[in-house]
Amino acid sequence: MKKVNGIIPKLIFEKAFQLAKKAILIAIILTPIRFSLELAGLPESAIFIIGLLWLTIGFSIYWGIKLSNAKDSYLILFLALLIYSPISRFPVALLWWIDTKWEIGTHYGDYFNNFGQAILNQVGYGSLIQIIPGFILGSITLAILRNRKAVIIKTKTLENE
């Protein structure tokens, strides 16, 4: 990849943003659904699977598949996660505020004493919890698909000789 004046080219950022857009929308819809299910009385263990980490892992694998032929795929994957993760976590911090303001009693109101702590932990730390495993699994997906394609090409070359 060629950087222009040390800056990532606009096209790479745009590709990452296009990947992240749908995931952001789904996360923004999913978080209040999870909150509502908890309010309805479902135990946290029952709604654990409806979480941002699982969504991130699924999207990372999907992005790895989608980017398998792309130039700068690892950078695009990383940027997509960097865009998606903090934005997807902000509704969780907002639900913390709602839960503590009206003393609703969901797990969203646990752990933090003020909104600053909730933002730091949900958006900062929570993003890392999504980015790191997401990048690892997306990278593994990319590596497997690229290796598979290389083996197929090599096999076809040997067959043609």
Image: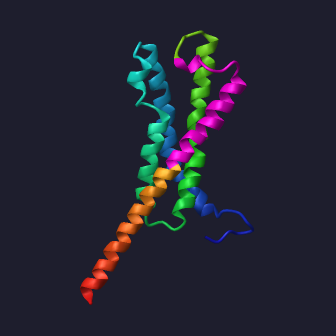
Q: Is residue 15 visible?
A: no
Seen at 44% across and 20% down, the residue is 44
Q: Per the image, is 128 magenta? A: yes
Q: Is 101 or 153 nearer to us in this picture?
A: 153
Magenta-drawn stretch, dominant element (helix, strand or loop) = helix
Give the vertical position of 70 relative to 99 (above or below): below
State which region is magenta. 107-134
Vertical side of 4 occupied by 136: above or below: above
160 over 7 or under it: above or below: below
Q: Position of residue 23 (x, y in %)?
A: 48, 43
- Residue at (62, 14) in percent of width and height: 100
In the image as oriented, which residue stretches furthest toward the right?
Answer: 5
Q: Quadrant of the N terminus?
A: bottom right
Residue 64 drawn at (x, y percent): 44, 56
What coloring was used for the rendering? rainbow
What is the quadrant of the C terminus in the image?
A: bottom left
Residue at image x 60%, y 48%?
Answer: 82
Residue 153 image-quadrant placement: bottom left
The percent position of residue 72, horizontal first and vertical second, equals: 55, 65
What is the x, y in percent for residue 74? 53, 60
- Residue 54 shows in the view: yes
